[in-house]
Image (cartoon, helix red, strand yellow):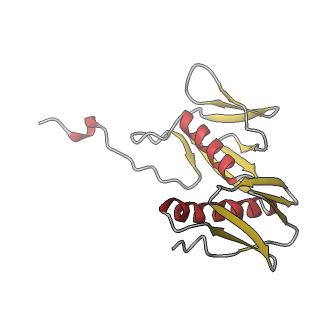
């Protein structure tokens, strides 16, 4: 039994949800998103709530039930408030700037790294060492943040790299500090 899938999704004020066959369309003040449902999952609107249900009790249906319920809930939250991820650049000379919409980062290599944001993603650089990624699609925002972080992941010896805001990087001691007997 899916505990998450059985919970109804409240449609927030200012958001309209329309369901046509297996397509859930969510419109709000920040934009519009579509969620395409699996053929074993269905959704309906009752009393300003979206109720997601499954066709049978198979393992696949049960796992998809909660997943698609959260996809619809994230779409409603996204068109109402939007999502954002914050990244920090840690290291001597690590900087970021915007050239138009392109994010240009200096990461200790002999060339700058240029990253073009996905459609629907907005990138801001409030400081040289901070990057903010905003959008209405939670999956796209997280994927783009992970793509940028993957360019120069934080390393455990000096802690340099691109990390999420507030991320803890466990530090290791170097071999030279062990002492030779």
Residue beneath the point at 45% across and 49% down = 169
Q: Nearer the viewer, residue 61 or 136?
A: 61
Q: Is residue 65 above or below residue 158?
A: below
Residue beneath the point at 22% across and 40% down = 178
* Image mark count: 0
Q: Quadrant of the C terminus?
A: top left
Q: Nearer the viewer, residue 131 or 72?
A: 72
- Quarter-wise, where is residue 75 in the image? bottom right
Q: Nearer the viewer, residue 83 or 160?
A: 83
Q: Is residue 79 above or below residue 162?
A: below
Q: Is residue 134 above or below residue 81?
A: above
The spot of residue 111 in percent (x, y) is 62, 20
Q: Is residue 53 above or below residue 161?
A: below
* Residue placed furthest toward the left: 181
* Residue placed furthest toward the front: 56
As drawn, is 33 to the left or to the right of 62? right
As drawn, is 165 to the left or to the right of 21? left
* Residue placed furthest toward the bottom: 47
- Quarter-wise, where is residue 93 in the image? top right
Residue beneath the point at 69% across and 64% down = 42
Residue beneath the point at 26% across and 35% down = 176
As drawn, is 143 to the left or to the right of 159? right
The spot of residue 155 in percent (x, y) is 44, 39
The spot of residue 17 in percent (x, y) is 83, 65
């Amino acid at each position: 039994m899916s505990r998450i899938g059985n919970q109804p999704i409240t449609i927030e004020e200012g958001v309209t949800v329309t369901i046509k066959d297996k397509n859930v369309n969510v419109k709000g003040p920040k934009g519009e998103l579509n969620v395409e449902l699996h053929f074993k999952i269905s959704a309906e609107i009752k009393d300003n709530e979206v109720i997601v249900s499954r066709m049978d009790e198979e393992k696949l249906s049960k796992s998809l039930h909660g997943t698609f319920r959260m996809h619809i809930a994230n779409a409603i939250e996204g068109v109402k408030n939007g999502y954002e991820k914050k990244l920090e650049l840690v290291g001597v000379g690590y900087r970021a700037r915007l050239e138009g919409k392109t994010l240009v980062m200096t990461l200790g290599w002999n060339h700058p790294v240029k990253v073009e944001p996905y459609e629907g993603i907005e990138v801001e650089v409030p400081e040289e060492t901070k990057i903010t990624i905003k959008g209405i699609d939670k999956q796209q925002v997280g994927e783009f943040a992970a793509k940028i972080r993957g360019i120069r992941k934080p390393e455990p010896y000096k802690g340099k790299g691109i990390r999420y805001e507030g991320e803890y990087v466990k530090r290791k001691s170097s071999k030279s500090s062990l002492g030779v007997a």
